[in-house]
Amino acid sequence: MEDNPASSSLSQRLTELHDDIAVDEYYIRKCMEDNYGLEFWLKAGGLYSIGPNGRLMGKGFYDYQNTLDERCQAFIAKALDESKKKKTMITKAFIAVVMSACVSITILRPIMKFLLGEHRLGTPDDGLLRLLPVTMWTPFNKDSWYVMLMFFLGEEIISYVTPGIVFSFMLLILCTCEDVGTQLVILGRTLKSVVRRAEGLDMPKEEALKFDADDLKRNLRSGRSKSRKSGRPKSKMDLRMRAMNSRTGSAKGQGKNMPPGSRGKARKNSMTKEQFTLNKESSPGPDSKNPPSNEDL
């Protein structure tokens, strides 16, 4: 028996992925132990290129071996496009909100303090720099311009770098969750047609594309509704009783609603039972040696 080339290529692909994931796990563990995860984040290069080979996620990982129909491929392309738009919108919104907050804190707040005359409060020798975004105390002369510039630049750097680091990790988590959710939606779509895709591996692609998951689901639903309306019997005795009732006319319509195979089988069994009853009544008893005469009848 010859091996299916699709299954052999799939097994080979799974073996390669297993080796790549093992290498990536060792690399990540080594980076986390040696440099406290710093090298891991610097060399990650994005969500889809973790490790030296970059094959832990993406780059052919979600390969369905050309078993998807056009509708499923269109659904996947639409889902990925919507996910990309969501990530772009979330990223732009986050950047706009963070930058607006940083500008309002580092620029607008000192301007408002100056307009309100907060720098005139206190005593000249209290050492408080009140025009900074966050009021700080300094042991140096607070009226010196280079002291004011040094503390102002320090607070500006902290105000921009800290939110950038924090919110960048939050964006990474949000984008990762969005990607995982999209792939789960795609996986659910492909699992609905897994039987058709498995059958499509043994036939040409043109014939495999004739099957459609929506049509299959629609046929299954119509078959279930028909079976519910027909009231399918549960045992052979029910089949015989329904066949006999349909023959005598006591329950009209029940025989028509039965499944074709069950109807024929029930009719055959009922006719066999009637013939057996007639033969038993007409046959002589075990004690009689001669057949009954006309006078006895």
Image: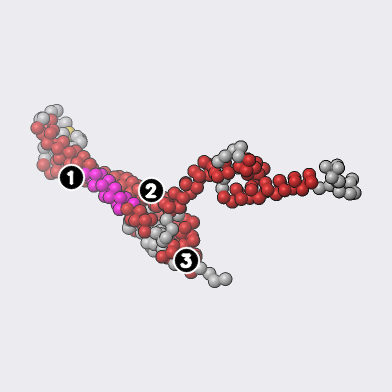
Residue type (three-letter) at the residue carrying disc 1: Leu
Q: Which residue is mark 2?
A: 181
Q: Which residue is mark 3?
A: 203
Alpha carbon distance from label 3 to label 2: 32 Å
Could you tell me residue 237's position as x and y percent? Answer: 67, 43
- Residue in the picture at 34% in, 51% down: 79
Q: Which residues are magenta?
A: 79-96
Question: Disc 3 vs disc 2: which is toward the camera?
Answer: 3
Residue type (three-letter) at the residue carrying disc 3: Met
- Left or right, 247 with respect to 67, comes to right
Question: Disc 1 vs disc 2: which is toward the camera?
Answer: 2
- Left or right, 123 with respect to 223, comes to left
Mark 1 or 2 closer to N-term?
1
- Left or right, 163 with respect to 111, comes to right
Residue type (three-letter) at the residue carrying disc 2: Gly
Q: Which residue is mark 1?
A: 153
Alpha carbon distance from label 1 to label 3: 69 Å
Element at badge 2? helix
Above or below, 12 against 283 in this view is: below
Q: Is 88 one of the magenta-colored residues?
A: yes
Give the position of the N terminus as an image quadrant. bottom right
Above or below, 115 against 6 in this view is: above
